[in-house]
């Protein structure tokens, strides 16, 4: 069955797979091109994965041709650009292969069982033209029967026709092909899929718990900004990556949990990636979009995007009744120990850790923890103390939730852009209605944090590295503690 090409798309890709040698085979046809040289670009990194991954290193057999099939000359420029001498031709075809044998959430993995294909490292774009619509014709390897993606599947038989409005959407929507297990469910008019390896065991609590988590997160922001969402759990490994309409996680190939700790730790991980669909995919630092896919995008605000997400991933489990307050305190105590038991917090501020993450996060040296502190662990601790103080200053009428909602409503929905660092602080100051300069200092400097002062406002105290309940506290502290811990 032939399917007509999109009338809008000027970038027409065809993808096929070579599992034996672990390649994605790519062919690309382009039309309506302006006269002159054609510069093709392969991204160097994937949003959410703050590391130069150097996707161009995996490209081989780059071969452009003119409309009559004649080979065109080309030159490489830097790591990420191919310059094609096409003259006045308005149409060019291009083929290349991409080596794909990586177990990370941002790189492709092709074997005899499946193909996980983040498209950042597969599909080149024309220089300066990431807003172009795109279509993919995807031919699964023989025996593969399922295709999972958040993109629009126009034709649902092989070769599949899949479309994207632009390259930002394309790069934010990985493909998974194979014989994966798919469990669908519906919640409040939206469709969801849990996608696991074919032979994964599934705990009966999995879907009901996901529904609780989803409902709690959605309630906080008051709306669901997607139509459908997919939980793509890829098998054994480590790491997750958020997307606007799905998450892709290496975690396990069995979801029968040995005990309650394993169950809660898994859901804390999944909740983190789910909360990101609001916080960083919609609420985002202004430096993270429009994306520069060729270079690092430095921002001082990952303590908000990642640190607060790491706090809310556990908040939401407590609020949903999935975990109790002791779980939240245990998680925060672990983060606090990770900060205070290492030398790095004396040399690197929370703000600086965000800016320098490109240097550390995925290639740590043996002494990294002695000179660097992670926003993943210090961010939720400072965020928790800030939440307590906002509640204390406003008689528990306002909280960090109000900060997150205003960031979402004002910058994502109203202004349709990312927030600037000072704009986020302005919202924090206005929500608290009082001087928050001490918290600004805790973010911007390596000054010691007065933990017990702020914990005391919620009827809590620090015992070593462990956050515990005070045996006695005043009425406001008791109210704040109940709001945070649910008991």
Image (cartoon, rainbow, N blue to C red):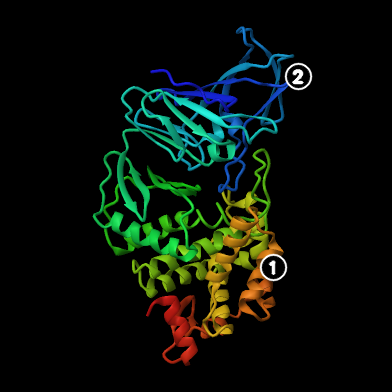
According to the picture, the residue beneath numbered tag 2 turns out to be 36
- Where does the N terminus fall, quadrant-wise? top left
In-image side of 434 versus 178 (left or right): right
Residue 13 vertical position relative to residue 358 in the rendered view, above or below: above
Give me the C-alpha separation between circle 2 and circle 1.
48 Å
Q: Residue at x 47, y 70 (%)?
A: 332
Label located before the other in sequence (2 or 1): 2
Residue 100, visible in the rendered structure: yes
Say what secondary structure mark 2 lies in.
Answer: loop
Question: Which callout, 2 or 1, points to the residue nearer the camera?
Answer: 2
Q: Residue at x 69, y 31 (%)?
A: 127
383 and 90: which is toward the camera: 90
- Where does the C terminus fall, quadrant-wise? bottom left
**Residue 270 picture location, percent across and down:** 41, 55
Q: Residue furthest left?
A: 204
In-image side of 206 versus 136 (left or right): left
Residue 143 vertical position relative to residue 118 in the rendered view, above or below: above
According to the picture, the residue beneath numbered tag 1 turns out to be 444
């Amino acid at each position: 069955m032939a399917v007509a090409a999109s009338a809008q798309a000027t970038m027409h890709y065809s993808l096929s797979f070579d599992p034996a040698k672990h390649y994605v085979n790519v062919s690309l046809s382009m039309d309506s091109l302006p006269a002159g040289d054609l510069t093709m670009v392969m991204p160097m990194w994937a949003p959410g994965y703050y590391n130069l991954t150097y996707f161009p290193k995996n490209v081989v057999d780059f071969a452009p041709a003119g409309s009559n099939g004649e080979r065109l000359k080309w030159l490489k420029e830097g790591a990420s650009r191919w310059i094609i001498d096409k003259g006045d031709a308005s149409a060019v075809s291009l083929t290349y292969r991409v080596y794909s044998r990586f177990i990370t959430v941002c790189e492709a993995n092709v074997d005899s069982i499946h193909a996980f294909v983040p498209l950042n490292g597969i599909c080149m774009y024309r220089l300066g033209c990431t807003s172009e619509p795109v279509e993919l014709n995807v031919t699964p390897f023989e025996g593969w029967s399922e295709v999972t993606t958040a993109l629009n599947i126009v034709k649902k038989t092989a070769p599949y026709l899949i479309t994207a409005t632009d390259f930002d959407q394309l790069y934010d929507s990985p493909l998974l092909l194979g014989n994966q297990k798919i469990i669908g469910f519906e919640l409040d008019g939206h469709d969801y899929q849990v996608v696991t390896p074919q032979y994964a065991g599934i705990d009966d609590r999995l879907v009901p718990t996901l529904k609780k988590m989803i409902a709690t997160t959605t309630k906080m922001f008051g709306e669901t900004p997607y139509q459908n969402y997919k939980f793509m759990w890829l098998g054994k490994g480590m790491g997750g990556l958020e997307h606007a309409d799905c998450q892709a996680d290496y975690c396990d190939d069995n979801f029968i949990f040995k005990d309650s700790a394993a169950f809660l730790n898994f859901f804390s991980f999944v909740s983190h990636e789910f909360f990101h669909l609001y916080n960083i995919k919609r609420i985002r630092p202004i430096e993270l979009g429009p994306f520069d896919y060729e270079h690092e995008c430095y921002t001082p605000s990952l303590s908000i995007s990642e640190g607060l997400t790491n706090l809310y991933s556990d908040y939401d489990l407590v609020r949903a009744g999935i975990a109790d307050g002791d779980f939240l305190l245990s998680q925060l105590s672990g983060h606090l120990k990770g900060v205070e038991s290492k030398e790095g917090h004396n040399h690197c501020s929370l703000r600086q850790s965000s800016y320098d993450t490109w240097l550390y996060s995925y290639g740590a040296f043996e002494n990294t923890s002695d000179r660097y502190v992670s926003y993943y662990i210090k961010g939720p601790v400072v965020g928790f103390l800030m939440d307590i103080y906002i509640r204390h200053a406003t008689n528990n009428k306002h909280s960090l939730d109000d900060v997150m909602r205003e960031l979402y409503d004002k910058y994502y929905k109203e202004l349709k852009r990312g927030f600037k660092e000072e704009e986020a602080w302005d919202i924090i100051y206005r929500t608290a209605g009082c001087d928050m300069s001490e918290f600004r200092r805790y973010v911007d400097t390596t000054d010691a944090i007065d933990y017990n002062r702020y914990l005391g406002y919620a009827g809590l105290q620090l015992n070593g590295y462990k956050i515990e309940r005070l045996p006695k506290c005043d009425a406001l502290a008791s109210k704040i503690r109940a709001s945070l811990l649910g008991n």
